Image (cartoon, rainbow, N blue to C red):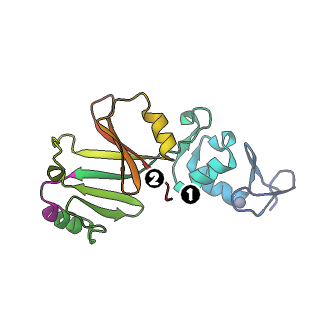
């Protein structure tokens, strides 16, 4: 293609094709010019130079921006944000409202906890009064953060005060804490299927 560079037999760590003349270095390999287009849009300030190939692949898969200044030593979080629930007083009324808002049928309909699958995001409706819980509506939106596994979650909550103790609910381990600002948040991990 005529770009300056040393021809290499290395394969691109993203697409697997020959890097050719125009390789770009990350911590444990090179990627090609074609993949550079994708990576450069997502990795600001050439932050790929401080990433491993696995980290770069995750950035590209997730389509999330990474800025050199925010990497803190090259770590990329394994915590994902993929669901939240809001409290409702009347499940049927709430389902109708959100079915109308989203233009889709509810994915899981339940008296206690109903779910809308929004892409890969799960938006829940929780009939809190039926479980005898108390919520004020200033704090009725509870973001849920998913950890890699139960061990990672337990390490995280080891020294924390829990508002809701670690409990296995269906296929997930779930607990709740209050952040430094007074917001209730939920921390979860998938239970191993065995
Ligand atoms: Zn490539």
Rendered location of residue 176, percent (x, y) = 32, 40
Residue positioned 34% across, 29% down in the render: 161
The residue beneath circle 1 is 61
Q: How many marks?
A: 2
Residue positioned 58% across, 55% down in the render: 60
Q: State how far apart marks 2 and 1 are (Cα).
A: 21 Å
Residue positioned 28% across, 71% down in the render: 104
Callout in the foreground (2, 1)? 2
Asked whether 36 or 16 is in front, the reply is: 16
- Identify whether 16 is placed above or below 76: below
Q: SS of the residue at dot 1?
A: helix
- The N terminus lies in which quarter of the figure? bottom right
Asked whether 171 or 28 is in front, the reply is: 171
Asked whether 47 or 152 is in front, the reply is: 152
Q: Which mark is residue 190?
A: 2
The range drawn in magenta is 87-94
Q: Is residue 46 magenta?
A: no
- Identify whether 59 is placed above or below 139: below
Q: Residues within 10 Å of mark 2 (few under 14, many from 20)?
A: some
């Amino acid at each position: 293609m005529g770009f300056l560079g040393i021809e290499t037999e290395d394969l691109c760590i993203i697409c697997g094709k020959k890097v050719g003349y125009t390789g770009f270095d990350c911590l444990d390999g090179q990627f090609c010019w074609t993949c550079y287009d994708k990576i450069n849009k997502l990795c600001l300030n050439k932050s790929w130079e401080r990433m491993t190939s696995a980290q770069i692949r995750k950035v590209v898969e997730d389509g999330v921006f990474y800025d050199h200044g925010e990497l803190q030593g090259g770590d990329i979080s394994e915590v994902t944000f993929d669901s939240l629930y809001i409290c409702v007083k009347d499940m049927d009324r709430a389902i109708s409202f959100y079915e109308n808002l989203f233009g889709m049928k509810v994915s899981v309909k339940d008296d206690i906890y109903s779910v809308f699958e929004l892409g890969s995001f799960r938006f829940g409706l929780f009939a809190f009064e039926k479980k005898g819980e108390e919520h004020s509506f200033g704090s009725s939106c509870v973001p849920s953060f998913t950890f890699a596994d139960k061990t990672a979650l337990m390490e995280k909550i080891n020294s924390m005060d829990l508002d809701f103790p670690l409990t296995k609910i269906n296929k997930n381990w779930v607990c709740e804490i209050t952040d430094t600002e007074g917001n209730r948040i939920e921390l979860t991990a998938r239970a191993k299927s065995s």
